[in-house]
């Protein structure tokens, strides 16, 4: 039954009735909604509006509704209820007359705000756990590749050698920041709006802090208008999901390239790949491609939500009902991508020979040749020019820096001697980058152990 109707003389247009119904979507908030109603029943009792017997009946009946709905991922067939709040009230009313007292002093507007905040807190804790698992997988990978060089790229052209572990740690840092964004978002989401009424505040003496505490909120919202009409806590988690989704999509893209036969740096586990219905030889990185695609979904969800909110007058507007599809979709996309990404990384097997060969191929240590000249007093800009000529010569002769004869070097600049060939080795290039945050093996080893400590701390 509708929660309203007294002032109406006409029924709802059937097309509109379908259009405005949201139960299929907000069914997902049933548990939160019931918890909120239980807390409300307690508050009404403390305020002298319900007897203890009435409260006990309400709590028991709400519990029965929750139990019946457990593990049901959609509302019962044929339920006419408009939304999740109506569903609960209908179910209660069918059980007994006391149901008619529960909505005293409250509004669906604040109920929905409370449900959504609880949902966001829940998702944030799931996302944090999924991020930690992914970080752990990355650190294991870093441990397996702490001695394995690969080409580091800029513009997707080989730039300077790096350790494969250094690449993995770059993503570890991104995911740490994603966790930080979550923590920050939760701090603001963790406030209970109940007691705000439809917009002006509750007209009965309910104890807002107690309600908040009962629901596990850290505090209460400070303005009733804001509390029912603000969704920035939802936008923030979708913002975190969007940025996190972008990180995941870049990780995927790197691994799609690195696992291709052309690169061959890693072998993906077959359990996260698929074949082709036509081409028998194919082993496709579909898991990574779908993770990459989810970056579009999370960003799209964020955009949908904030565009829906833009320009709405205070306080609640029915537009708010459309906050849920993007919120759910964006969070699901992020969580799914995080969980699969951890599995992909865990099963990722590096191919050290291919990595090493690629890292030392061609001209990847040209910067080190220039640095060698700098150490002998040549100004860097001049050194850059000289090595540019060396590179040109290599290209013309079909040689690389290691196979170009010393006479060729010396013909370009007589400063060169045989020690240049030590300086342009991959190992020397790596070892030279001996700063905090650099790719020198000792620095990377320290970074791995630092990251492990941070992870252990986070898991405590
Ligand atoms: N289904 C609504 C929503 O999701 C619940 C609140 C309805 N409030 C109202 N005043 N019509 O936002």
Image (cartoon, rainbow, N blue to C red):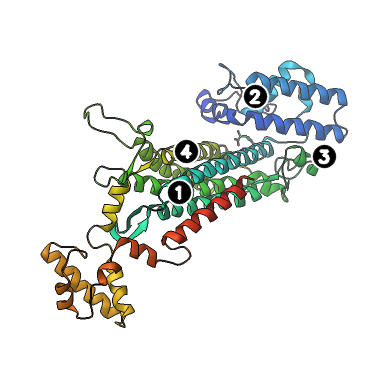
Q: Secondary structure at mark 4?
A: helix
Residue 346 seen in this snapshot: yes
Relative to 159, is 71 above or below? above
- The answer to whether the residue labelled 2 contacts the one labelled 4, judged by CB atoms less than 8 Å apart, is no
Q: Residue at 33% of width from left, 48% of height from top?
A: 352
Q: Could you tell me if the residues under marks 3 and 1 are in contact, i.e. CB atoms within 8 Å?
A: no
Question: Which secondary structure, mark 2?
Answer: helix
Mark number displayed over residue 143: 1
Sequence order check, earlier mark of 2 and 4: 2
Circle 3: element type: loop
Q: Secondary structure at mark 1?
A: helix
Identify the residue shown where x is 50% and y is 50%: 175
Mark number, residue 173: none
Is disc 2 surrounded by few (<14), some (14 to 19) or many (20+) residues within 10 Å? Answer: many
Q: Residues within 10 Å of mark 1 (few under 14, many from 20)?
A: some
**Disc 2 marks which residue?**
87
Q: Position of residue 31 (x, y in %)?
A: 65, 29
Q: Which residue, given by chain and number where applicable, does mark 3 sit on?
A: 206
Q: Quadrant of residue 72?
A: top right
Q: Which residue is disc 4 drawn over?
A: 333
For disc 3, the neighbor class at 10 Å (few under 14, some 14 to 19, many from 20) is many
In what quadrant of the picture does the C terminus appear?
Answer: top right
């Amino acid at each position: 039954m509708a929660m309203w109707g007294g002032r109406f003389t006409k029924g709802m247009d059937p097309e509109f009735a379908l259009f405005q119904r949201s139960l299929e979507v907000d069914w997902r908030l049933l548990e939160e909604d019931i918890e909120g109603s239980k807390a409300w029943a307690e508050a009404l009792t403390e305020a002298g509006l319900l007897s203890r017997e009435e409260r006990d009946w309400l709590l028991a009946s709400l519990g029965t509704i929750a139990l019946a709905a457990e593990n049901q991922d959609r509302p019962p067939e044929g339920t006419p209820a408009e939304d999740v709040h109506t569903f609960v009230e209908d179910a209660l009313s069918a059980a007994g007359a006391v149901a008619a007292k529960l909505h005293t002093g409250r509004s669906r507007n604040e109920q929905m705000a409370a449900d959504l905040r609880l949902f966001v807190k829940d998702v944030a804790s799931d996302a944090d756990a999924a991020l930690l698992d992914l970080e752990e997988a990355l650190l294991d990978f870093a441990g397996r590749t702490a001695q394995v060089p690969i080409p580091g790229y800029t513009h997707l052209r080989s730039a300077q050698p790096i350790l494969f572990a250094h690449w993995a740690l770059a993503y570890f840092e991104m995911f740490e920041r994603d966790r930080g964004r979550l923590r920050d978002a939760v701090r603001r989401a963790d406030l209970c709006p109940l007691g705000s009424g439809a917009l002006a505040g509750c007209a009965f003496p309910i104890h807002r802090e107690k309600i908040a505490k009962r629901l596990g909120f850290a505090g209460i919202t400070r303005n009733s208008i804001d509390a029912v009409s603000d969704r920035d806590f939802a936008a923030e988690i979708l913002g975190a999901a969007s940025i996190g989704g972008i990180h995941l999509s870049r990780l995927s893209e790197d691994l799609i390239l690195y696992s291709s036969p052309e690169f061959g740096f890693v072998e993906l586990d077959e359990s996260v790949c698929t074949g082709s219905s036509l081409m028998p030889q194919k082993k496709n990185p579909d898991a990574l491609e779908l993770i990459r695609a989810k970056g579009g979904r999370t960003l799209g969800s964020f955009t949908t939500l904030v565009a829906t909110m833009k320009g709405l007058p205070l306080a609640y507007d029915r537009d708010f009902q459309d906050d849920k599809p993007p919120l759910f979709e964006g969070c699901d996309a992020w969580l799914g991508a995080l969980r699969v990404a951890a599995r992909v990384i865990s099963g990722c097997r590096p191919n050290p020979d291919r990595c090493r060969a690629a890292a030392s191929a061609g001209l990847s240590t040209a910067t080190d040749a220039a640095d060698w000249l700098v150490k002998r007093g040549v100004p860097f800009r001049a050194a850059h020019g000289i090595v540019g000529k060396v590179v040109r010569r290599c290209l013309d002769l079909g040689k690389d820096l290691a196979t170009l004869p010393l006479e060729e070097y010396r013909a370009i600049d007589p400063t060169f001697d045989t020690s240049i060939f030590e300086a342009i080795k991959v190992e020397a290039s790596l070892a030279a980058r001996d700063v905090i945050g650099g790719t020198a093996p000792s620095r990377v080893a320290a970074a791995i152990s630092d990251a492990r400590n941070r992870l252990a701390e986070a898991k405590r």
